[in-house]
Image: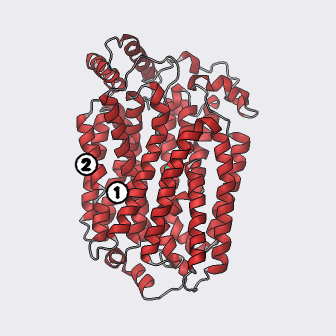
Amino acid sequence: MAGGGLSVAAAGGVEFEAKITPIVIISCIMAATGGLMFGYDVGVSGGVTSMPDFLKKFFPVVYKKTEEGDLGSNYCKYDNQGLQLFTSSLYLAGLTSTFFASYTTRRLGRRMTMLIAGVFFLFGVGFNAGAQDLAMLIVGRILLGFGVGFANQAVPVFLSEIAPTRIRGGLNILFQLNVTIGILFANLVNYGTAKIHGWGWRLSLGLAGIPALLLTVGALLVVDTPNSLIERGKLEEGKAVLRRIRGIDNVEPEYLELVEASRLAKEVKHPFRNLLQRKNRPQLIIAVSLQFFQQFTGINAIMFYAPVLFNTLGFKNDASLYSAVITGAVNVLATIVAIYVVDKLGRRFLLLQAGVQMFLSQIVIAIILGFKVTDTSENLSSGIGILVVVMICTYVAAFAWSWGPLGWLIPSETFPLETRSAGQSVTVCINLVFTFLIAQAFLSMLCHFKYGIFFFFSGWVFIMSFFVWFLVPETKNIPIEEMTERVWKKHWLWKRFMDDDEYIQDDLPKKNGFEEKL
Ligand code: BGC
């Protein structure tokens, strides 16, 4: 889910025989639509809020400021709580619904939860595209948020359970890649629809119906995972599905593992309480901090508000939307880079390298804006404008091959089996909490901090790089079940949390089937 790349990690251990069957391919398409939907929602709001027709209808006060030259300050044109609520309400709703979604994922199954998500998305799109007033618009965003909460919980779990072990890690970043493609798709749509006067914004919001419909139809077509069926007592059906998805007859060994995993999962009565135990603290601290820091890189200031930001800098409407398309494309390409290098260069190298790159580009942006965009100055010259766009792209690229995917990947591969699912829910929640905060606060922060907003985020990038340097261990190429011995017990600080004799990770099954216990 990513949001982001929200995959529950592959469990390590023995690999069972499995072919890549059509059903597995369909599930990859599911991942695409879940990720696309999330990304589309992230990317669409900024473009829409920079469209004059949309502002005129829903935010006449903001419209007046942007159109009539009533510029108290360039930086404050868009400082409006309602406008920010339009973006942020989705994340607030998503956050609330993750708690229900973890219940339905377990009790009703992954497939049903995806179907619920699809239906929320469809209604949300309907309300948004047909909105007559602000209330309808916000209700639509809230419904979409529910969709995000349900989809981001169920789709990654579904994927991690249905895919053969050897492609699970790749699927994790693939989910993130689809989020970035969704953002780019939204940017492109906005660029096109901005030219349609009167109802272009409706088309932008309405086209989210495509991934929503795909997800809904997809959920109707696929089978539920064997893990989920077994967990809900449908043993024979679970075995039959396992045969179909693996494409082989002898699924007995994997089936027995799943049954055993499900039995043990039911014995863990308080996964969330487990998560708070001392021995699980390092993973929890890492997961929570990575998500917090991921949002404080300031990425969503760009993803949500790029067109608005470019407008603030004096770009014309068209140039703003065009520039957002460029940053969106860089985001996709750099995520592909991450897929290739993450297991070669390692997580720490990418996070630290990107830290330097993000820090420097943010400083340069702040300095240019500090000199060039005063409260009431006119447009940036085109040379300076291009330089700002190049710097923003440099920054986005660094994020996309580091904090973007790794904020999700590292938590998903470090939690031991007994806390993995609870850990994953917490990861999603923390992500949505801070995504909401940034969405709600950025335009006001821009108004008050002005160009200093980029110094603010660069300060955080500085701090998080130190955090990585000292506290984030390298997990490249380490099987999940060996994390404790080879990673945590070797770390200068975290090893102190690992001396508990009763560390029970190794007593638990080393297969999937356990993740669903929340
Ligand atoms: C983050 C999102 C962000 C996206 C940008 C994800 O990893 O969680 O908040 O919008 O990356 O590509």
Q: Residues within 10 Å of mark 2 (few under 14, many from 20)?
A: some
Whether residue 119 is visible, yes or no, is no
- Residue at 40%, 70% in the rendered image: 49
Q: Choose mark 1 or mark 2, whichever is in front.
A: 2
Residue 272 falls left or right of residue 242: right
- Residue at 64%, 31% in the rendered image: 278
Q: Secondary structure at mark 2?
A: helix
Mark 1 to mark 2: distance in Å?
18 Å
Q: Is residue 99 above or below residue 136?
A: above
Q: Amino acid at mark 2?
A: Leu
- Queried on whether the Cβ of the residue with tag 2 lies below 8 angstroms from ligand 1, the answer reads no
Residue 239 falls left or right of residue 263: left
Q: Give the image quarter of residue 190.
A: bottom left
Q: Give the image quarter of residue 473.
A: top right
Please name the residue that numbered disc 2 is placed on: 213
Q: Amino acid at mark 1?
A: Ile
- Queried on whether the Cβ of the residue with tag 1 lies below 8 angstroms from ligand 1, the answer reads no
Q: Is residue 223 above or below residue 37?
A: above
Please name the residue that numbered disc 1 is placed on: 142
As drawn, the residue found furthest toward the right would be 492
Percent across and percent down for residue 55 are 36, 76
Q: Give the image quarter of residue 51.
A: bottom left
